[in-house]
Image (spheres, helix red, strand yellow):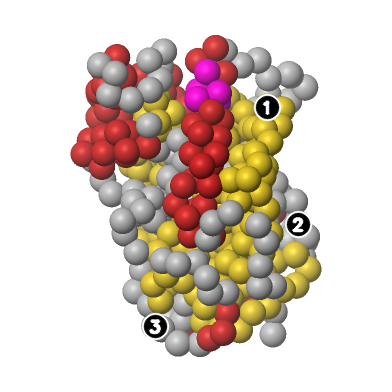
Amino acid sequence: MSIFIHIEKSFKEGLPFVSYRKPNSKKISAFFQKDTSLNIIDEYSNSGFVFAPFNNTDDAVFIPKESSIYIEEEQPIFDFKLHSKNTSINYLSKENHIDLVKKGIDAINNNDFQKVVLSRKELVELANFDCLVVFKNLLSIYANAMVYVWFHPKVGLWLGATPETLVKIDGNSFETMSLAGTQPYQENENAIWNQKEIDEQQFVTDYIVEKLTPISESIHTGKTETIKAGSILHLKTKITGTFKVKNSKLIAALHPTPAVCGLPKEGSKNFILKNELYKRSYYTGFLGELNNNEKQTQLFVNLRCMQIISNNAIIYIGGGITKDSIPEKEWEETVAKALVMKKVL
């Protein structure tokens, strides 16, 4: 039975599952849980698939490999299908988001923190939603992203295509990245980054290195490069090394990253929890394989994602705010990012 038939069957029967394809891979993988139990994990020592929220004091959900059917198969080629009837789009207030950004800039100028990542959600009313069609659309057009569909009857249905690795772990070696800066992709044009975006990227890189140094035996920072995620460009710096602690401590040091929270972490996180007008839930959390083949873990930050509730898609988008941010442009950036998910509906 193919993965897509399994997805349809599990969704219909209300059984938890996740199906995903890693960046630049030709293979789709899936865990199909055999019962409806809600498994919570905190030590990250078991084997399976984890789905963790932004707020690291909330529970991370786990699909255990031992109580699931695991399937891996080659990705077939399928046509991109656009749901032309899904035209009703309701913005949450532009004014509210701009006010939030202004408040964040004021807090930065008050030296509360150096950077904060502020987000909003957008509601798209769906005339005719098909989980499999949307998942296949994501697979078709976002080859260099971690594309997934995740479902648990006690939590809900999420889909996404994220360009950001939280961490890869193999034995006692790790690889992570800093990701910041955003601009639309223009074909046949070289990306030019302004100082605000370059500074933001350096903030993120320096902070990650600072947090990992006490628990690492060695750290190496690569060159900063421009990467493409759908119709969006970002700045990315690869960070590698070896560590001397449990996986859970390494993950705790990284999550939430400055790319989704801010820096310093605690001050920016407290500002987000107090001032954003909604709960992020699993947006800007992380997801991925734990202890595959006993020692390999690969986790991704849950960006470019949506939650499906009844006949609505809730799309989550945000951006990094520094002292040089311009509120109107920050709004426009979230509008551009929202297109990543809207394109597949």
Q: Position of residue 118 (x, y in %)?
A: 36, 33
Q: Main secondary structure of the magenta part?
A: helix
Q: CA distance from mark 1 to mark 2?
A: 23 Å
Q: Which mark is residue 128?
A: none
Q: Using the image, determine if residue 82 lies above or below residue 51.
A: above
Viewer-closest of 99 and 294 = 294
The answer to whether residue 224 is magenta is: no
SS state under label 2: loop
Report the residue marked by disc 1: 224
Report the residue marked by disc 2: 25
Reading the chain from its start, which is encountered first: label 2 or label 3? 2
Viewer-closest of 123 and 214 = 214
* Residue 313 seen anywhere in this rendered image of the structure: no
SS state under label 3: loop
Which picture quadrant has residue 317?
top left
Type of the residue with mark 2: Ser
The quadrant in which the N terminus is found is bottom right
Type of the residue with mark 1: Thr
Q: CA distance from mark 3 to mark 1?
A: 43 Å
Q: Which segment is the magenta one?
A: 199-203
Reading the chain from its start, which is encountered first: label 3 or label 1? 3
Q: Position of residue 318 (x, y in %)?
A: 42, 35
Q: Is residue 275 left or right of residue 49?
A: left
Q: Position of residue 89 (x, y in %)?
A: 38, 43
Q: Is residue 32 left or right of residue 94?
A: right
Q: Which mark is residue 37?
A: 3
Q: Using the image, determine if residue 86 lies above or below residue 104.
A: below
SS state under label 1: strand
